[in-house]
Image: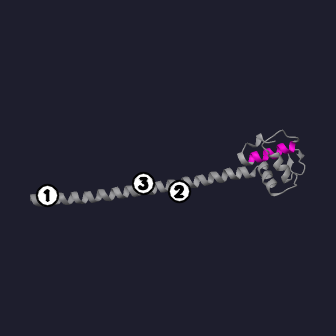
Amino acid sequence: MDPILKDVAQVVAWVVASIGGVIAAFKAVAELNRGRADRKAEFRWKQAEMAKTVLDETWSADPVRCALSMLDWSGRTYNTGNRETKEITHEYMWNALRTTNTTFEDHDQVFVRDCFDRLLTRQNASSTS
């Protein structure tokens, strides 16, 4: 075989291999970016599902629903297990939520505080009265 033809064939092979290597590198980078974007989207979806689960559990709790009702309505009564509260007005609710002199005269004020604790801190149901 002619040495010049052999050298030309070798140079062409190197050029083709180099171009193929560059194309493979770009393809690998593109695949990595696409995989990272897919994982990011999947993680975001899982975060949204977890947030929905936590909110559903929180909003379904009786004390949380009572606290939200207290914010919306004044003068309602609430069932607290085996008894019913007296009418809880907005003034009574704000009085029960005070931060000074937190010695309470009745169980209804404790009920109000427990409801709002559950709403704001997502406590376990067993810790509310």
Q: Split into 4 quadrants, where in the image is the C terminus?
A: top right
Numbered disc 1: secondary structure: helix
Q: Residue at x 45, y 57 (%)?
A: 34
Sequence-wise, which precedes: disc 2 or disc 1? 1
Residue type indicated by callout 3: Leu
Numbered disc 2: secondary structure: helix
Residue 14 horizontal side relative to residue 81, left or right: left
Task: Give the camera-side residue of 111 and 105.
Answer: 105
Considering every residue shown, the one lying at the far left of the view is: 2
Could you say where residue 89 lies in the image, as x and y percent from the top left? 86, 53
Residue 38 horizontal side relative to residue 2, left or right: right
* Residue 100 shows in this picture: yes
Residues drawn in magenta: 107-118
Q: Split into 4 quadrants, where in the image is the N terminus?
A: bottom left
Residue type indicated by callout 1: Asp
Quarter location, residue 107:
top right
The circle on residue 7 is 1
Considering every residue shown, the one lying at the far top of the view is: 103
Quarter location, residue 13:
bottom left
Residue type indicated by callout 2: Ala
Q: Residue at x 71, y 45 (%)?
A: 121
| Disc 3: which residue | 32
| Disc 2: which residue | 41
